[in-house]
Image: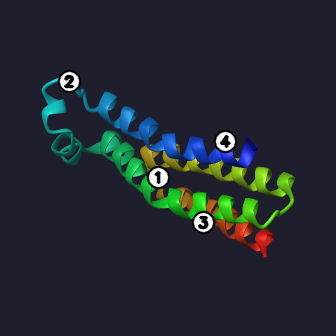
Amino acid sequence: MTIGLWCVLIGILMPLLWTGLAKSMGRYDLRANQHPRDFLAKLSGPASRANAAQLNSFEAFPAFAAAVLVAQYAHAPQHSIDRLAIAWVVLRLIYGALYIANLAALRSLVWFSGMACVVGLFVIAA
């Protein structure tokens, strides 16, 4: 399996990191597991922002996965696919950390950079 495809797997799992942080910061317990979405919706502060990072991860992932698969299918240079995919993963991790830290302007810049990686994957597939 290529590095780009490993990055797709990491992208699938990344929301679990953010929800885990949201739950741990929000003092999640077995009772909260009866209605986990209600629990997450009631969070505030950094825990709420970690949940928002989780939701944004779900939103950002499909375009990334499609871009990697299109680039692979088009036989784009593998080193380019891998570099852009790794950059996307790193940027998404930074994005989540900035979200939790409430650094909105910098977070938006990192989000845009991650989307540039997605666009780049489609461009190298052309």
In this rendering, does residue 109 appear at all? no
User: In the drawing, what numbered circle is on residue 29?
Assistant: 2
The three-letter code of the residue at mark 2 reads: Asp
In space, the residues marked 4 and 1 are separated at their CA atoms by: 16 Å
Between circles 4 and 1, the one closer to the viewer is 4
For the residue pair 62 and 55, the one nearer the viewer reads as: 62
* Dot 4: element: helix
* Dot 3: element: helix
User: In the drawing, what numbered circle is on residue 112?
Assistant: 3
Q: Position of residue 38 (x, y in %)?
A: 16, 45
Horizontal side of 126 relative to 22 (left or right) equals: right
The numbered mark, 2 or 4, whose residue comes first in the sequence reads 4
Cβ–Cβ below 8 Å for labels 2 and 4? no
Residue denoted by label 1: 57
The three-letter code of the residue at mark 4 reads: Trp
For the residue pair 100 and 11, the one nearer the viewer reads as: 11
In space, the residues marked 3 and 1 are separated at their CA atoms by: 14 Å
The three-letter code of the residue at mark 3 reads: Phe
Cβ–Cβ below 8 Å for labels 3 and 1? no
The numbered mark, 3 or 2, whose residue comes first in the sequence reads 2
- State the image quarter where residue 45 is shown: top left
How would you rate the neighbour count of disc 4 (Cα within 10 Å): few for under 14, some for 14-19, many for 20 or more?
A: some
The residue depicted at 70 percent of the width and 52 percent of the height is: 85
In space, the residues marked 3 and 2 are separated at their CA atoms by: 35 Å
Residue denoted by label 4: 6
The numbered mark, 3 or 4, whose residue comes first in the sequence reads 4
- State the image quarter where residue 19 is shown: top left
Q: Position of residue 108 (x, y in %)?
A: 53, 62
In space, the residues marked 1 and 2 are separated at their CA atoms by: 24 Å
Horizontal side of 35 relative to 121 (left or right) equals: left
In space, the residues marked 3 and 4 are separated at their CA atoms by: 22 Å
Q: Position of residue 51 (x, y in %)?
A: 34, 46
